[in-house]
Amino acid sequence: MFHQSSFVQSSSMAAKLIEAALEKQAAAFKAALPGLIKKQTVNESLRSGENSEFLSHPSVQPLVEVLEQQMTEKYPKASAAQITANVKAYLLGLGEIASGRALKASKEKANGSGTAGLGDDNWSDFAGQDLGAGLPK
C-alpha cells in the first residue's frame, strides 16, 4: 500500500514537471515565432522578383544573409517590406559602385572631364545612402 501511494505521488510530480516544462517551451516558441516569420518573409522577398538572379547568386549570398540579419536585429520594428527594400537598395548601390557606374558619375559631376575631384574622396557619398533611412528603431 505504501509503495502504491509513493508511486502515485511520484507519477503526479513527474506529470506536473513535464507540464510546466511544456508550457515554458510553448511560451518561448510563441515569443520567437514573429521574428522567424519576418526573417523568412525577408528571405523570400529578396530572392524573388526583378533582382532575384543577382540576389540569389552564390557569390552574393553571404552578403545578403549578413545584411538580412543585421537589418532585422538593428531595426526590430521595421516591417519585412522595409527591410527588403533597404537591403535591395544597398546591394544595388554596391553593384553600381562595383561596376564603376556610380564612381564614374560622381567624377563627371566634379568638372565634366572625370578627372577632377580624385583627391576629394567623401566616404559618405561613396556609400551612397543611410542604411537606416525610413526604418523605425
Image (spheres, rainbow, N blue to C red):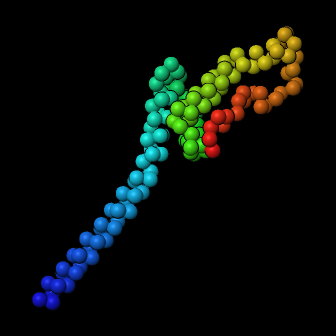
Going by the picture, which residue comes out furthest to the left? 1
Kindly identify the residue that appears in the image at 31 percent across and 71 percent down.
17
Going by the picture, which residue comes out furthest to the bottom? 2
Where 105 sits versus 77, above or below?
above
Question: Can residue 62 be seen by looking at this rendering?
Answer: no
User: 109 and 113: which one is in front?
Assistant: 109
User: 38 and 67: which one is in front?
Assistant: 38
92 horizontally vs 108: left or right: left
Kindly identify the residue that appears in the image at 44 percent across and 38 percent down.
40
Question: Can residue 25 be seen by looking at this rendering?
Answer: yes
Kindly identify the residue that appears in the image at 78 percent across and 31 percent down.
123
x and y percent of residue 116 in the render? 88, 16
Which image quarter holds the N terminus? bottom left
Kindly identify the residue that appears in the image at 65 percent across and 26 percent down.
94
x and y percent of residue 28 in the render? 42, 57
Going by the picture, which residue comes out furthest to the top? 113
34 horizontally vs 99: left or right: left
Which image quarter holds the C terminus? top right
x and y percent of residue 69 in the render? 55, 41
User: Across the whole image, how many numbered discs are drawn on residues?
Assistant: 0
x and y percent of residue 126 in the render? 75, 27
Where 47 sits versus 32, above or below?
above
